Image: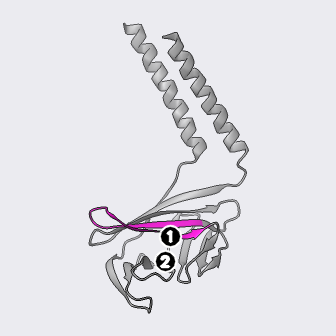
Amino acid sequence: MKNIFAKIAAIAATTAAFSVTVAANNPAQAIDLNFSWQGDAGYSAIGSFSYDETTAPTIISEAGSGKTNFLQSLNVSFLDPSKNLLGTYNTLSGGVSQSDFFVFNFNTSTQTLFGGLDIGGGTGVIGEYFFNGTVGDSLRFRQDINQQGTSRTVDQNSASIQVSKVPEPASMLGLLAFAGLGVGSSLKKKQATC
């Protein structure tokens, strides 16, 4: 039984050391956020985006194709009411947008999306999906019909988009170490009662 406790202690120590190393060797403070939206008919959009929180202003506003000012990445997936995947789009990768239609506004202080939004497709493929409108007013999940400006609305609503921060890897490792200590404590109590 002492061997199990020694292994758990070694795992906890290694995890703690790794967490400190990750934090020390990762000076860029990239923040990753998830977002989700649910339409009135049950279709949904889920995705994530990231930016460097050390250089980002309070308001991030990005639009069009090409290099962005602050966003580093943005992807979105669309699901039908049965949660079947309809499509996934990397709207922005490596700080570069591929879509002329791309629009994104985010308040880093309140961690909320606001104003105009246009993400998803926009690269010239008939049938691609996109998500656009004004956050808090009218948001539409649409599908392109002919790349000539004709699209159909698949779902819509006027609700906001939920945004949540993705836990940092060092935090997750710390939680694992803490869990390991809890398991060790439980095993020790169990051994004492036997």
Packing grade of label 1 (10 A; few <14, some 14-19, many >=20) is many
Is 89 contained in the magenta span? yes
Tag on residue 113? Answer: 1
Q: Residue sitting at 43 percent across and 17 percent down?
A: 187
Query: In the image, what residue occupies the spot 31% across and 78% down?
Result: 154
Task: Please identify the quadrant where the C terminus is shown.
Answer: top left
At a point 53% along the width and 13% down the height, the residue shown is 3
Q: Helix, strand, or loop for circle 2?
A: strand
Q: Is residue 89 left or right of residue 32?
A: left
Quadrant of residue 137 within the rendered picture: bottom left
Amino acid tagged 2: Leu
Real-space Cα separation, disc 2 to disc 1, in angstroms: 8 Å
Q: Main secondary structure of the magenta part?
A: strand
Report which residue position mark 2 lands on: 117
Q: Residues in magenta?
A: 73-93
Q: Is residue 129 above or below residue 50?
A: below
Kindly check if marks 2 and 1 are in contact, taking CB atoms under 8 A apart as contact: yes
Instruction: Give the vertical position of 178 relative to 57 (above or below).
Output: above
- Left or right side of 45 for 27: right
